[in-house]
Structures are given as C-alpha cells and as structure tokens.
Image (tube, rainbow, N blue to C red):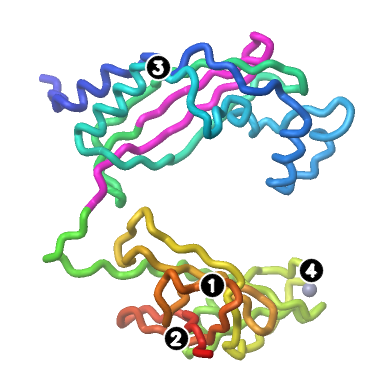
Amino acid sequence: MAVQEDEPTARLKAYEGRPAAVTGVGKDPVNLPMIRHWCEAMGDTNPAYAGPGAVAPPTMLQAWTMAGLSGQRGRTSPYTELLGLLDELGCTSIVATDCEQEYLRPLRPGDEVTFDAVIESVSDRKTTRLGTGYFVTTRMNVRAGGEPAGTHRFRVLKYAPARERPDEPRPRRPRPVVNRDNAGFWQGVAEHRLLIQRCTDCGTLRHPWLPGCNACGGPDWDTVEASGEGTVYSYVVVHHPPFPAFDPPYAVGLVQLAEGVRMVSDVVGVPHDKVRIGLPVRLEFRSCDEELTLPVFRVVER
Ligand code: ZN
C-alpha cells in the first residue's frame, strides 16, 4: 500500500504544473544602459558586454523580466492561491533559496523579452533550521523576439519560523571553519592576539587570511599583531531572519583596523541603534562558551 500523503501536502501538490505567470512582457527591451549598470555593479569588465556587437551577460536573464517596485505583472491566480494556502498553513515566512538558469541564445540590445512561468514543483513538508515548510520551484521560460532564450528556475522556501523553546538549552554560536589557510588566525585568537597576515615579498597586509598575496601573488607570509585600535567602517543591523544563538536586532560591524585591513565582527558596548560609521572601537576577546572565543570590538567612550 502506498504511503498516504498528508492532506495539506496533497492540496499543495495539486498546483504543480499550473501557471505562475503568463504572457509576461519585459518592461524594457534588452538595452546597453542596463547592461552597463549591471556590469558596473558586478565588476564585470568582459568586453563582450560593451561596444558594437555587445550581448547581455547571460546571468542578466531574470533582470529583463523583473517588474520593479511598481508591481508584478502576469502573476496568475494559481500562484497567488498557492502562496495564500501556504500562509493559511502557518508558512507565513519566505526565503529565496537558489536559482538555476539555462541559456539557449544570447540576448542582444533591441531584443523584446517575453516570458511565462509554471509552478514546477512543491516539495513534501521539510524541516530546516529556519523552520518547517515547503519548497516551491517555479520555472520561467524567457523568449527574445518570440524565440526561446533561456530558462530561469527559482526556488523559495515558505515556512513557519522555528521558535526557540524556553526549556531547551540556548543554542551555541556557530563554530568558525578552521582550515590550513586560517588556522594561524584562530591560534592567535586562542592566545588573545589578533594576527594579521603580511606578505613577506611586498609587505602588504591582508585579512581575512588567504594562501597568497592579492597584491603580488607571493605565497610567503608572516604575521603582525594588531594593536586592537580601529573604527567602524560600515555596519548592518540584523533584524531578520532570526538565527539560533543570536538575539536580533544586533549590529555587525566592518571594522577598519589601525593597520589598514578590515574585519567583520560584533560591535559591542552600545545599543544596536547607536552604532555609527566612524565610531572608534577597541578589540577585546569575548568568551562565548568553553570552546569558543571571538574577537569583538567595543565602542570607545569619548
Ligand atoms: Zn605581496
């Protein structure tokens, strides 16, 4: 006897094969200004994407179909219904997980883009670190001047956020991934020393630790110990999603060390909404649990 699917899953799977978007039309034809902005944002200087005979970068495929802030055109009622049904099942949160693209022909300036999309699959109920829910995969077929140009398969997880149970021990912070390239850094941290790699060929400092020098390619290095003085070069305040062992909102800083390199770490000593670019900070070592010590940066009182 076949295992009977639970009833919500069967209702969700009934949407497989139904349209997610029909007769979508790109807001602009493929054009050089959008290609140029994309390439600048990506740092892509490939000459194939500029000048006479330019083609669009293949990975721009989805960009030509995006509706922008003014709204999604062509979204179908089955797709809206499916998302509504997931909301009713308590899967009110959504996160994009991955996409896959296939390219069938290059897109060139002047090409008019049209597309449609189908709900390709709805997964069984899955439990992830974020919560329990369903992966929904849509496949968009993109055409240029009516010819197939590519496909864009896009997967989201609609889920009910996992809640921490007060009776469970608090989860520990994630462990750093220590490997042969960065083991010296973590050895330094264990000794309460913040070590910066220095290329012994050209003297350039680098962080995070890498097997070679970005400036000269040299493989040899030694270390200098950071003074611990720095300033907040940039920061973000994390509100969402919640991760075990972290209590949002919290500030994550990109700290410019006095030696010139930058590193990402916690900015502590002030509330998250008082962190500002330019604040002076000083290194300290925080013991998170019996195994984990992390370098963090405390705002210096002025
Ligand atoms: Zn070097």
Q: Is residue 187 magenta?
A: no
Q: Which residue is mark 2?
A: 285
Q: Residues within 10 Å of mark 3 (few under 14, many from 20)?
A: some
Q: Residue at x 58, y 16 (%)?
A: 25
Q: Residues within 10 Å of mark 2 (few under 14, many from 20)?
A: some
Tell me whether circle 3 and circle 1 mark residues in contact (CB < 8 Å): no
Q: Is residue 149 magenta?
A: yes
How much space separates mark 2 and mark 1, taking CA atoms?
Answer: 21 Å
Q: Which residue is mark 4?
A: 215
How much space separates mark 2 and mark 3, taking CA atoms?
Answer: 53 Å
Q: Nearer the viewer, residue 254 or 274?
A: 274
| Nearer the camera: disc 4 or disc 2 | 2
Instruction: Tell me if residue 42 comes above or below residue 293 in the rendering.
Output: above
- Using the image, tell me which numbered label, if any, was put on residue 276: 1
Q: Which residue is mark 3?
A: 76
Q: Nearer the viewer, residue 39 or 250?
A: 250
Q: Earlier in the sequence, mark 4 or mark 2?
A: 4
Q: Residue at x 77, y 27 (%)?
A: 55
Q: Residue at x 33, y 57 (%)?
A: 242
Kind of residue at disc 4 = Ala
